[in-house]
Amino acid sequence: MKLLVATRNHHKLREIREILHLPGVALVGADEVPGLPEVAEDAPTFEGNAIKKALVLAKASGCWTLADDSGLEVEALQGAPGVHSARYAGPAASTPANNAKLLQALDGVKDRRARFRCVLALCSPQGESWTVEGRCEGRILEAPQGAQGFGYDPLFVPDGHAQSFAELSAACKNQLSHRGQALQRAVTVWRERLVGC
Ligand code: IMP
């Protein structure tokens, strides 16, 4: 069966493909299905955005659909950038601009604690939905380190490690990360639903 993954972010799609192995289930990205609508991520929570993306694309495609909404929450910034992580420095902000804004906001701040959160939503073409969540606690560096990964990876060091997500191997990031945790939970909780649909 075909499981539509409601993202046009190739980094996210690659990570999801690396982790989610289900017999007989082919993961298809939103860019591979012509004519799907763009979905505005305007809900105030990760859960709201994930359900909205999955629901709209499940209805439009007639396929079971998995959506991820994720972001970074910084303690000293009262949870910002949160659901605005992709657009922290403005509506069409680049990754370097978002990262520079974060470093500026934390200039001179001692408390560097932060967490990545990921909510995955699964929707049936009939509009039923379910969610699971994964989290990864860590801290924000004072300057970027490493060249792998995407987004805030060069600034985030997960607890128990000395290297940033952009320095750790993909396998290590997938094991520790918010997305990895949420996907491992999804495989456990949704296995029968996914391989049966
Ligand atoms: P959205 O889920 O498409 O709204 O975007 C989430 C944003 O959060 C991304 O554009 C990144 O800025 C950030 N983000 C989410 N997951 C990760 C990750 O694994 N590494 C680095 N940044 C991430």
Image (spheres, helix red, strand yellow):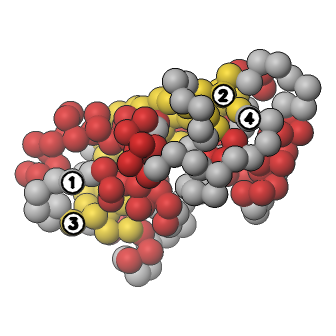
Q: Which is more N-terminal, label 3 or label 1?
A: 1
Q: Nearer the viewer, mark 4 or mark 1?
A: 4
Residue, x 21% and y 54% (percent of image)? 21
Place of residue 68 in the rendered image (x, y in percent of width and height, measured from the top left): 45, 48
On whether ligand 1 comes within 8 Å of the CB at mark 1, the answer is no
Depth check, front residue: 167 or 131: 167
The residue at the point 54 percent across, 30 percent down is: 161
Residue on which disc 2 sits? 139
Question: Mark 2: which secondary structure?
Answer: strand
Query: Neighbour class for label 2 at 10 Å: few (<14), some, many (≥20)?
Result: some
User: Quick one: label 4 or label 1, which is nearer the N terminus?
Assistant: 1
Residue bearing the label numbered 1: 21
Say whether disc 3 or disc 4 marks the residue closer to the N-terminus. Answer: 3
Name the mark nearer the viewer: 2 or 3. 2
Amino acid carrying mark 3 in the image: Ala
Residue type highlighted by circle 1 = His
Q: CA distance from mark 4 to mark 1?
A: 33 Å
Per the rendering, the mark at residue 141 is: 4
Residue 97 percent across, percent down from the top left: 81, 55
The three-letter code of the residue at mark 2 reads Arg
Q: Looking at the image, which residue is at 83% across and 48% down?
A: 100
| Residue 155 visible to an observer of this rendering | yes
Badge 1: residue crowd in 10 Å (few <14, some 14–19, many ≥20):
few
Q: Which residue is mark 3?
A: 26
Q: Position of residue 62 (x, y in %)?
A: 26, 66
Residue 94 or 157: which is nearer the viewer?
157
Say what secondary structure mark 1 lies in.
Answer: loop
CA distance for labels 1 and 3: 9 Å
Q: Where is 171 relative to 158, above or below?
A: below
Q: Mark 2 or mark 1: which is in front?
A: 2
Are circles 1 and 3 on residues that touch, CB within 8 Å? no
